[in-house]
Image: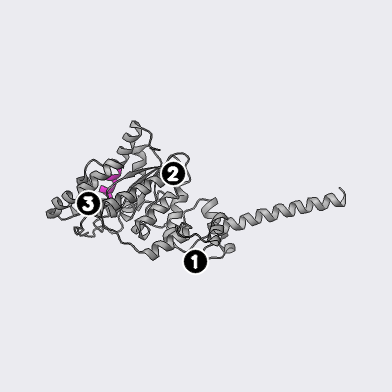
Amino acid sequence: MDDRNQSLCFFAILGFAAVYLGFGFLYALDKRDTSNVPYEIFRGKVHAATAVDGPRLLLAGGSNVIWGSRSTIIENEGGVPTFNLALSSEAHDPKAMRILTTNAVRSGDTVIYSSISFWNSSQIDPAAAGDILNAAGHLPDDSSHFQSLKKKLGRFWSPYPQKRTVVTSLPALYRRYISHEPSEHMQGLNAKGDLASCLTPGAVPGPNSYVEPAEQSILLQELQDFEDALRQRGASLVLLFPPNLILEGERDKWIQNFTPVFEAMKRRFTVAQETLDASLYTDKSYFCDTGFHLADAEAAERSRRIGQFINETRKAAPMSRN
């Protein structure tokens, strides 16, 4: 081999190594811990859900879904791989939870969405929600040329202070993405993303105070926007009212005033329950530590009903309604 060919071979190898290391560096930057714990929990859940091929059932919402779902039971009853993507407080804003979920779905997926905003009871923290969306690269008003360039390059920068440099995080990246070990932020959750058991057995949850329904037209439009966004990605939406511990004397008021909302949802969307009464409870023994967190036995029973609904829906028609 003459000197020219040796030089070409050397530079070819050097060029390949540069490209390989460069893309490896960008991959590490993209995958490193953003130091935003809620987003890292969500990212861990999404990563677990990518382990299966084909359509999936993705559970979305707030802590009522984390406590009140047993994904394995739903999967066994419904016949579809099931994963729990829910976050406490719905990522501090139901809109943020919907954005995160929309960007996690793939064609053929079905999302079961259970939000306490259906009961007009949600704790919104715009700053915290914005932090999560920023870490995820999903801020809708992020339109600057620089930010657009970052997204095109794979959103490998982050404005958050990092707990680890890229180099020192490589062992953790290997464990998470090559060995598929759970993220350190997933402690307390099972492989499906559920809280496997009530953490505070014996606690005495109090009933939720009655609130008037939210403006129906606004809620329905938000849900329609969510369904439209999912459909654009080839996914479908199923709604489910969260469990709600109430005072026996206020049951009629809850049913009377929230039934119009429930019926309007059923006219426009697929709803995984026949009656609103199925989500209203007066017996504290069914709950764990709050009036939205089901205890183990009832969480299993509710999951069984969800799985049976999905199974019946699959028999009647394809899950995706695009």
281 left or right of 107 in image: left
- Give the percent coordinates (x, y) of residue 239: 31, 45
- 282 versus 106 height, above or below: below
Secondary structure, magenta segment, majority class: helix
Span highlighted in magenta in the image: 296-303
Residue 301 visible in the snapshot: no
Cα separation between marks 3 and 2: 38 Å
Instruction: Name the residue at 37% across, 45% down.
Output: 227
Is 302 magenta? The answer is yes
Cα separation between marks 3 and 1: 41 Å
Classify mark 1: residues with Cα within 10 Å, few (<14), some (14-19) or many (20+).
few
The residue that label 2 is drawn on is: 232
The residue that label 3 is drawn on is: 286
Label 1 element class: loop
Label 3 element class: helix
Say which of marks 3 and 2 sits in front. Answer: 2
Labels 1 and 2: the sequence-earlier one: 1
What amino acid is at disc 2? Gln
The residue that label 1 is drawn on is: 160
Residue 9 visible in the snapshot: yes
Instruction: Name the residue at 18% across, 55% down.
Output: 246
The picture quadrant where one finds residue 96 is bottom left
